[in-house]
Image (tube, grey):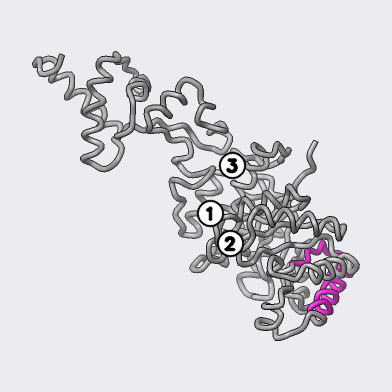
Amino acid sequence: MKRKIIFVDTTLRDGEQTAGVVFALREKVQIAKMLDKLGVDQLEVGIPVMGGEEQEAIREIVKSNLNASIMAWNRAVIGDIKESIKCGVDAVAISISTSDIHITHKLNSTREKVLQNMIAATDFAKNYGLYVSVNAEDASRTDFDFLCEFAKAAKNAGANRLRYCDTVGILNPINTFERIKALREAIDIDIEMHTHNDFGMATANAVAGIMAGATHVGVTVNGLGERAGNAALEEVGMALKHLLDYEITLNTTKFLELSRYVAQASNRELPAWKAIVGTNMFAHESGIHADGTLKHPQTYEVLDPKEVGLERQIVIGKHSGTAAIKQKFREYGTEISEEEAQNLLEKVRNASISLKRPLFDKELVYLYEEYLEEKIRGDVS
């Protein structure tokens, strides 16, 4: 039996850092509650040092008595951690850059100072009994020997895990696997994959890291996050369940409700073609696909739509076949013959091309009524 993977959702921190996204206090609390009901293990809910409503929202989430661990994000600065402690969280993420390009140009610092600051912040947090994730920002561009030194120092300071951040999304699944495997062999510490989607590989890289031995995975609902976003909770969850046969404790039937709520709260449309929760995920128009799905759903559906809160849709349009048309009329309570479906198919295709879209149910019914009138007049056989 494969090990349990700990899901760390950062929709309320990294997700809200998406350019232009702001969650209202009540939305943050509601999202936290929905994530908790879904079964996410740990929620990264904000940055306490921002003060004001950010702290108020974090306190409200803490007071909600959720099953999930509540984590706050901090720089490797003791003052930040003090603000997190005031909010009552049980876990802190302590983040500092480890790549030379960040250390030199962003921090104007040195490797030695990075280690010193991380160790001091970790030691302070552990003295208050907090769970600590030490975040190696830009880990994917960090010298491997220094990353190992950083991870070892974090473990010796009491850190519970290392967050491996592919901050600018430059990894691919193959080198992700190689790097995480090598890091796990060098240092015995839990590793969280935190991947970004700049090249469209966030989910793939997260899964590759898990295959290499990562114990935790950082995700956001709908893949929200800076620039192109993070690995999507719903994608990673279903990939682990169906592609790798991991036992996951997430209530996946709540994915759609959660995704739609976060889409509305973030004012970011949930695309119809979105993996796992998009409405096209189980929509079939092509005649071959629709026919196969109607005969046996698993011919073109790798999972049951109900598993993620969706329903199967047979779409009638340019690419439809007679099997789909007959099935559609069965849904209306009408049985039509193969001959009728074949005659109707030409009308459907012409109408769909003219409208540049599939047909609505009523439009399909009108075409059928038109066909019946033509049949009475003798215009068709």
* In the depicted structure, whether residue 95 falls above or below residue 184: below
Which amino acid, by three-letter code, is at mark 3? Answer: Lys
Q: What stretch is highlighted in magenta?
A: 114-135
Q: Are marks 3 and 1 in contact (CB under 8 Å)?
A: no
What amino acid is labelled 2 in the image? Answer: Gly
Q: Nearer the viewer, residue 181 or 221?
A: 181
Q: Is residue 159 left or right of residue 67?
A: right
- At x 30% / y 15%, what residue is drawn? 338
Classify the position of the C terminus by image quarter.
Answer: top left
- Say which element carries label 2: helix
Residue at numbered disc 3: 254
| Place of residue 21 in the rendered image (x, y in percent of width and height, measured from the top left) | 51, 65
Q: Relative to residue 337, is residue 283 drawn left or right? A: right
Label 3 or label 1, whichever comes before in sequence order: 3
Dot 2 corresponds to which residue?
A: 15
Mark 3, Cα crowd under 10 Å, few <14 / some 14-19 / many 20+, is many
Amino acid bearing label 1: Val
Tell me which residue sits at (72%, 54%) in the image.
42
